[in-house]
Amino acid sequence: MSPLNLVQNLTRPEPLLRAEHVTLAYAGEPGIVRALDDASFEVWRGDRFVLLGPSGCGKSTLLKAVGGFIAPLAGSLRLGGELIRAPGPDRIVVFQEFDQLPPWKTVKQNVMFPLLASGVKRADADTRARHWLGKVGLARFADAYPHTLSGGMKARVAIARALAMQPAMLLMDEPFAALDALTRRSMQEELQTLWDESGFTMLFVTHSIEEALVVGNRILLLSPHPGRVRAEINSHQFNLQSAGSHEFQAATQRIHALLFGAGEAEPSALQPLAVLP
Amino acid sequence: MTALREPPIRPEYVLPLRPPGAALPAPAATAPGLALASFGWLRKSAILLAIALLWEALARWFDNDLLLPGAWQTALALADGLRSGELVGYVSVSLAVLTQGFVLGVGVSFLLTWLAVSSRLGRELIDTLTSMFNPLPAIALLPLALLWFGLGQGSLLMVLVHSVVWPLTLNASAGFRAVPETLRMAGRNYGLGGLRMVLQILIPAALPSILSGLKIGWAFAWRTLIAAELVFGSTSGQGGLGWYIFQSRNELFTDKVFAGLALVILIGLVIEHLVFQTLERVTLRRWGMQR
């Protein structure tokens, strides 16, 4: 056996994120509300892993737990084998709200902010910020203040800011939900392009079945009240171009049935889809 | 009937995309802004002038220098006082005390604000204290201040600090509590905590409230100071602007009383326009946090 093989054996692929029996709760009106019950899943390097479910399924709470903002009531979340205990710049969150960009910083200063906060030298941060602003098509707006930008442009700044950090995992909390439908579509396209170029790992929360199929390569379906894992589905075969296809429609209906419908259809619904060539 | 309910079916058409016409002529770069700004100044000056004219007319009609000197006579007294250096001395005494009191008050207020936002008990304590003391006129504490600190700067500082601390604390702590949760989470996400979080996220985000608190605090301090000087006048032989007004009344120089009042107003206007509006322009308006 050559030494090379040994090394390969040692670096056996491991999932990047491992959630084991995670139960999450938050303090709500009637006391403690169970947001997510006993969820287990794995996210691998390079995944575009989507958390999909109706409101109340705990998908955003789960994302915040991965971000380290909420500690699980039970179970464990491990990133690269390390227990997640606190927020950190290795998991940058892109929020839905537009006020995630400090209004007192220009677009470029916003992108440089987390870089500087984690000790990158100013010159390096500047170069990286310019590079990623170019990637999202905002090079011309580097010195503009956020309040002069449109919603889509603000979302782009937030994405550039997250990617410039080159985090182990990008956490996206319904990042396009506040955008209009046309802008959302072009953002989904751009995100796909960015992923093709840079190959980051992403955890993406959405309540739109179509967005989940288009954006993700694997989808964790969550049922609401309390959130429970319903299924894990592959969606790597779909993109924006296949959005109208028969397979796409079938996948949409299958997910819809899993989330909302018909308990009796369960066994057949879990059958794999028509296999693509 | 159906024709009314069903619009006619019209032919479709598709146009070739025209090149996006020439850029609109940029609105002559500085002209409109400049013009608007100068018009703003002009309008305000015109208003002031109109008030002065009205005042002058009223004074002429009333024709009693002892009770109501005219605008012109007041302006002359003001110019006279400024030229002889008499008024300058009074003003500098007042402003020196004011600055000390204001800075001291701001310092105390930031301590209290820190207490108010850092713990639940602190918050309840500060809430109670502000609701107790904010409605209490600072000047009402003057007798007590005189008892404790005697006739002198000490008692002036005490009422000044009181007049600044409560409105500023109230505004600043409300501002800190109103910082959007998303922004706080973003800060924590980048590994900010403690002092860096306060300096880089919380203070800039709460700046609109902090600035308006400073503005209110300054106005309260200025009026409290003038009132306090009216009550007990000079400290160690050196009086302030309030003392000047009081003294001039005693000597029946009513035009000097008016000159002193005009100066109080003018200093207020200058600080509001030069200090606070400039601060707002280079921060809040530029950042789109205020219109």
Image (tube, rainbow, N blue to C red):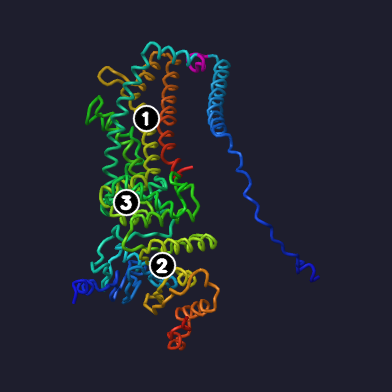
Q: Chain of mark 1?
A: B
Quadrant the N terminus of chain B occupies: bottom right
Q: Image point 46% across, 43% down: which residue?
A: B290
Query: Contact, CB < 8 Å: mark 2 with mark 3?
Result: no
Q: Chain of mark 2?
A: A
* Identity, as a three-letter code, of the amino acid under mark 2: Val
Residue at the spot of label 3:
A115
Of pointers 2 and 3, the one earlier in the residue sequence: 3
User: Are marks 3 and 1 in one subunit?
Assistant: no
The image shows residue B237 at horizontal and vertical percentages of 27, 17
Residue A223 is one of the magenta-drawn residues: no
Q: Would residue B79 be found to the left or right of residue B49 on screen?
A: left
Q: CA distance from mark 1 to mark 2?
A: 54 Å
As rendered, which of B157 and A5 lies closer to the eye? A5
Evaluate whether residue A114 shows in this view. Answer: yes
Q: Is residue A156 above or below residue A204?
A: above
* Identity, as a three-letter code, of the amino acid under mark 3: Leu
Q: Is residue A141 above or below residue A234?
A: above
Specify the segment rendered in magenta.
B64-72
Residue at the spot of label 1:
B222
Residue at the spot of label 2:
A205
* Identity, as a three-letter code, of the amino acid under mark 1: Trp
Query: Contact, CB < 8 Å: mark 3 with mark 1?
Result: no
Evaluate whether residue B181 shows in this view. Answer: no
Task: State the SS at label 3.
Answer: helix
Query: Contact, CB < 8 Å: mark 1 with mark 2?
Result: no
